[in-house]
Amino acid sequence: CKAYYKLCLKLHPDKLSPNLTDNEKELAKKKFQAISLAYTILSDEGKRKEYDETGDLYDDDEDLSSSKEGMKQWTDYFDAVFPKVTTADIDAFEVKYKCSYGEEKDVL
């Protein structure tokens, strides 16, 4: 928490030096937004767990529950349509495909 507050004071748009260029101000603004989002996720147990499981970042503007549910529906659909691919499946395909008419047709 302490490091977050120190960075916020350093990068907050209202606290920046007036001598900074527009590019430096824009960079500081983006950094401030990034650390704010990180703090929002890390300080909320539910958001942190979801991030740890999926790696997805959601902005506060998005409805987290519907986004998470929507993602789950698509994942369930994808899993139902396409079977899981294993290393054994890939190896079996390789044996069947190598030097086959299909490979020749694909390559040439």
Image: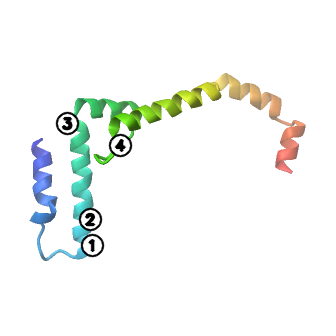
Q: CA distance from mark 1 to mark 2?
A: 6 Å
On screen, residue 60 above or below 84:
below
Secondary structure beneath label 1: helix
Of callouts 3 and 4, the N-terminal one: 3
On screen, residue 48 above or below 3:
above
Of callouts 4 and 2, the N-terminal one: 2
What's the amino acid at mark 4? Answer: Leu
Question: Dot 3 corresponds to which residue?
Answer: 43
Tell me what residue is drawn at x 26 percent, y 67 percent: 26
Tell me what residue is drawn at x 87 percent, y 44 percent: 104
Side of 74 where 45 appears, left or right: left
Tell me what residue is drawn at x 64 percent, y 28 percent: 81
Marks 2 and 4: in contact by CB < 8 Å? no
Side of 83 where 62 appears, left or right: left
Tag of residue 23: 1
Return the x and y of residue 32 as percentages of the image width and height: 21, 56
Secondary structure beneath label 3: helix
Q: CA distance from mark 3 to mark 4?
A: 14 Å
Q: Residue furthest top?
A: 88
Return the x and y of residue 50 as percentages of the image width and height: 34, 32
Marks 2 and 1: in contact by CB < 8 Å? yes
What's the amino acid at mark 2? Answer: Leu
Return the x and y of residue 24 as percentages of the image width and height: 23, 70
Of callouts 2 and 3, the N-terminal one: 2
Of callouts 4 and 1, the N-terminal one: 1
105 or 73, nearer to the observer: 73
